[in-house]
Image (cartoon, rainbow, N blue to C red):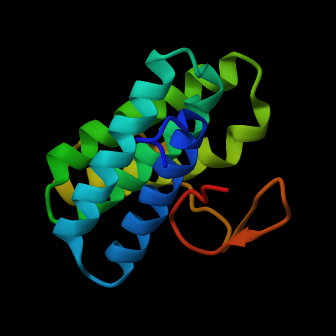
Amino acid sequence: MIADGRADLRPDLARTRMNYANCLDSLGELEAARTASQHSLDEYQALIADGRAELRPELAGTRMNYALCLANLGELEAARTAYQHSLDEYQALIADGRADLRPGLALIRYNLANCLKHIGDPWMPSKWCKSLPTGIKTPSGLTVPTNRVPLT
């Protein structure tokens, strides 16, 4: 449909690809999950470059999920870089007034700290080691019991 001129569906495609990547990751199909995650990231970046700045939170969450996939593949340095980019994006969004994204920031700090711990990075700030509650409430009221960012 997008090829037929329905560019308005591009954000839905990016979101669907990320959800598909999360499903593949959960099934242990990590290489396929990485590919789907990368396609989702590419699409969100293209949309934002095309002026869709309101999709920045989705990009930040997608990047965090991509980092988690890389960590599951054992590519901890690449995961660290992706987590850091996601952290930077969340901090910029919150600085721009998106206080509703603070749970995502807490989650990215937790995941980054975990990654740094497994790398053995002595720089890991202790403030990132605080554990999260067992679930995070989304604005729609869903409780997310995992270490993923929900893409709604």
Work out whether 139 lies above or below 55: below
Q: Is residue 124 visible?
A: no
Give the quarter of the figure containing the C terminus. bottom right
Farthest residue in the front direction?
Answer: 4
At 46% from the left and 41% from the top, the residue drawn is: 4
Percent position (x, y) of residue 110? 48, 53
Name the residue nearer the viewer: 150 or 41: 41
Q: Is residue 29 left or right of residue 12?
A: left
At 57% from the left and 26% from the top, the residue drawn is: 91
Q: Is residue 74 left or right of residue 18?
A: left
Percent position (x, y) of residue 44? 45, 35
Quadrant housing residue 80: top left
Percent position (x, y) of residue 46? 40, 26
Farthest residue in the bottom direction?
Answer: 27
Quadrant housing residue 93: top right
At 34% from the left and 59% from the top, the residue drawn is: 68
Total numbered badges shown on the rendered structure: 0
Q: Is residue 41 left or right of residue 129?
A: left
Q: Is residue 35 left or right of residue 139?
A: left
Percent position (x, y) of residue 51? 55, 15
Q: Is residue 145 visible?
A: yes
Quadrant housing residue 54: top right
